[in-house]
Image (cartoon, rainbow, N blue to C red):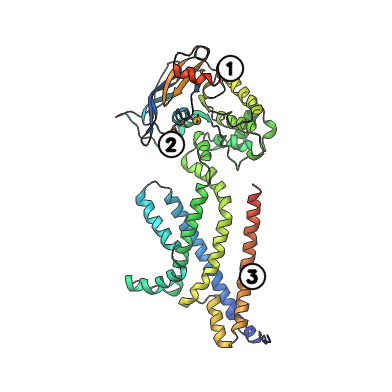
């Protein structure tokens, strides 16, 4: 894993990313650039590779081709330059890219506070007391100060997802990846999670958001990427892409959402 | 039914039964400790994605799970020396067999426990940048262990019952001493009733513990 002195303004740079699951090609030559502080929404039908793309960006899946840069961290999966990834360097790469999942993935044997503290203690190696203070501040930021001592089973879906966001933020990542984080929530709980994400975007966090919330994508994202069958079909400024899609398949996909749009 | 119970002769030989019970507990304890050690190592090795490593382990587990302990015991004591020239004393053969037998079951319990933890727990931990051993130690194991406790205790109970089989190769456990006592007193009814009661008193608390643990687990946390 090399470190470069990249002074370009872009925070995330993905080049010709490819991913096979056995014989199945799930991502094909995906190129994506996200400016520092940019918010990109990824939309597309089920099975188009959106989750796989996000999971590749923080190396939860190992790409089979291409190059990924997040901030100063570069991983190259091409030909001779292909690096052997070891557990330690992969972990360092992941710590710099926060990820929030559709299914929360909170640690069920830990309280909300312990969930947020876990990375602070085991990865950032902060002393217990400092970690606790930082974790409490993060819980406050997502509006859950009063839930610090509560276990995930006793939290609502919206609260769980906000704890998960706080837990990811605790690593002070340069980018945040969100994979359909509101899809498992009751409709009345979606708003509180989107509000936290809006706030993060305002604070200048670089974000990639896989979502079916077209209104959110329209309002918060700078750019929208439409994926189908493992390729990026169309990409552009959020409002342009939604109001005036160029590709037939984008139009067809968006037609399912017409009534949900502003 | 007018059997005249007479525990008098038994009482004068009580030392023999207590000694037998002592052996039973000792064998149980030793084979649980060794069996669990084998089980943990085998379960962790089975996570390695390499057939060269896992195939022999799967073979071992299969052999010991799919043959009766009694057969294993007799084989280890009588057949192994013939085949290899290694002569095992009765106690060694007994401990070795029961540990390997238990180990095969413990390994499966550990593996099932680890695999019962959803992939999402791994994802959540790895996404934070936690190293593999830290994920195992801090996230997976604590949750897996709680789920493993009832089946582990159950296996320990079986382990104690299985020790009664070592009497066939003349290890002086509770059952073996009961046989000795029977031939000395000609009071089989009294002897085996008492020895059954001793087994029961040893095991009943353990089964209650399992029930308690299971009900606590069912309540979640
Ligand atoms: N671990 C895996 N092993 C094999 N195939 C996989 C794996 N993960 C995903 N796939 C396949 O890769 C393809 C893309 O899946 P992916 O989850 O990335 O799609 P998605 O766009 O996120 O879909 P959804 O909107 O349903 O979440 C699908 O065909 C899926 O079956
Ligand atoms: Mg998905």
Q: Is residue B83 left or right of residue A190?
A: left
Indicate the secondary structure of the residue bearing disc 1: loop
The secondary element bearing badge 2 is classed as helix
Q: Which mark is residue A261?
A: 1
Q: Specify the subunit that label 3 lies on.
A: B
Residue carrying label 3: B201
Are the residues flagged by discs 3 and 1 from a single subunit?
no
Does mark 3's beta carbon lie closer than 8 Å to ligand 1? no
Question: Horizontal and vertical percent for residue A234?
Answer: 44, 17
Image quadrant in which you'd find residue B180: bottom right
Instruction: Indicate left or right for A3 with A130 as reference.
Output: left
Could you tell me residue B215's position as x and y percent? 65, 53
Image location (x, y in percent) of residue A80? 29, 29
Distance of label 2 from label 1 (alpha carbons): 44 Å
Which residue lies at the image location 48% right of the left edge and 51% below the top edge?
B111
The chain to which mark 2 is attached is: A
Mark 2 vs 1, N-terminal side: 2
Q: Residues within 10 Å of mark 3 (few under 14, many from 20)?
A: few
From the image, tell me which residue sits under label 2: A88
> Does the residue at mark 2 contact the one at mark 1 (Cβ under 8 Å)?
no
Is residue B2 positioned above or below B120 on the image?
Answer: below
Q: Do labels 2 and 1 share a chain?
A: yes
> Do the dots labelled 2 and 3 sit on one chain?
no
Residue B193 visible? The answer is yes
Could you tell me which residue is drawn at 43 percent across and 70 percent down? B71
Horizontal placement of A193 versus A245: left or right? right
Which label lies toward us, 2 or 1? 1
Chain under label 1? A
Give the residue at the far right of this rendering.
A146
**Could you tell me which secondary element the residue under label 3 belongs to?**
helix
């Amino acid at each position: 894993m090399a470190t470069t002195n990249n002074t370009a303004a872009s925070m995330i740079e993905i080049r010709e990313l490819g991913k096979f699951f056995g014989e199945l090609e799930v991502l094909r030559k995906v190129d994506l650039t996200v400016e520092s502080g940019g918010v990109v929404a990824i939309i597309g039908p089920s099975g188009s590779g959106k989750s796989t793309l996000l999971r590749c960006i923080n190396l939860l899946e190992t790409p089979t081709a291409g190059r990924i840069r997040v901030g100063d961290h570069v991983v190259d999966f091409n030909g001779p330059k292909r690096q052997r990834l070891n557990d330690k360097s992969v972990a360092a790469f992941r710590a710099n890219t926060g990820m929030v999942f559709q299914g929360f993935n909170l640690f069920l044997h830990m309280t909300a506070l312990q969930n947020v503290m876990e990375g602070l203690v085991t990865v950032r190696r902060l002393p217990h007391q400092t970690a606790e203070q930082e974790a409490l501040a993060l819980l406050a930021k997502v509006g859950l100060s009063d839930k610090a001592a509560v276990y995930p089973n006793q939290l609502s879906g919206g609260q769980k997802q906000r704890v998960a966001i706080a837990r990811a933020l605790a690593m002070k990542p340069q980018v945040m990846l969100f994979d359909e984080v509101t899809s498992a929530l009751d409709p009345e709980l979606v708003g509180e999670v989107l509000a936290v994400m809006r706030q993060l975007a305002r604070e200048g966090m670089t974000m990639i958001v896989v979502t079916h919330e077209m209104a959110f994508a329209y309002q918060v994202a700078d750019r929208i990427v439409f994926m189908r069958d493992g390729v990026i079909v169309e990409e552009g400024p959020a409002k342009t892409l939604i109001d005036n899609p160029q590709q037939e398949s984008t139009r067809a996909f968006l037609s399912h959402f017409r009534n949900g749009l502003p | 039914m007018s059997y005249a119970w007479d525990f008098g002769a038994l009482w004068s030989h009580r030392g023999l039964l207590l000694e037998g019970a002592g052996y039973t507990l000792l064998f149980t304890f030793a084979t649980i400790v060794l069996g669990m050690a084998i089980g943990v190592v085998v379960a962790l090795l089975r996570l390695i994605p390499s057939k060269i490593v896992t195939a022999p382990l799967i073979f071992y587990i299969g052999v010991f799970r799919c043959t009766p302990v009694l057969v294993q015991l007799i084989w280890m004591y009588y057949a192994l020396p013939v085949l290899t020239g290694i002569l095992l004393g009765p106690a060694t053969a007994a401990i070795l067999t029961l540990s390997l037998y238990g180990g095969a079951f413990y390994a499966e319990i550990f593996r099932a426990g680890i695999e019962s933890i959803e992939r999402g727990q791994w994802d959540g931990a790895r996404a934070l940048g936690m190293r593999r051993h830290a994920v195992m130690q801090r996230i997976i194991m604590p949750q897996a262990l709680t789920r493993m406790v009832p089946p582990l205790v159950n296996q320990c109970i079986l382990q104690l019952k299985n020790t009664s089989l070592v009497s066939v190769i003349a290890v002086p456990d509770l059952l073996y001493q009961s046989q000795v006592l029977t031939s000395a007193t000609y009071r089989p009814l009294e002897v085996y009733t008492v020895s059954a009661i001793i087994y029961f008193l040893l095991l009943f608390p353990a089964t209650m513990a399992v029930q308690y643990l299971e009900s606590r687990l069912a309540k979640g946390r």
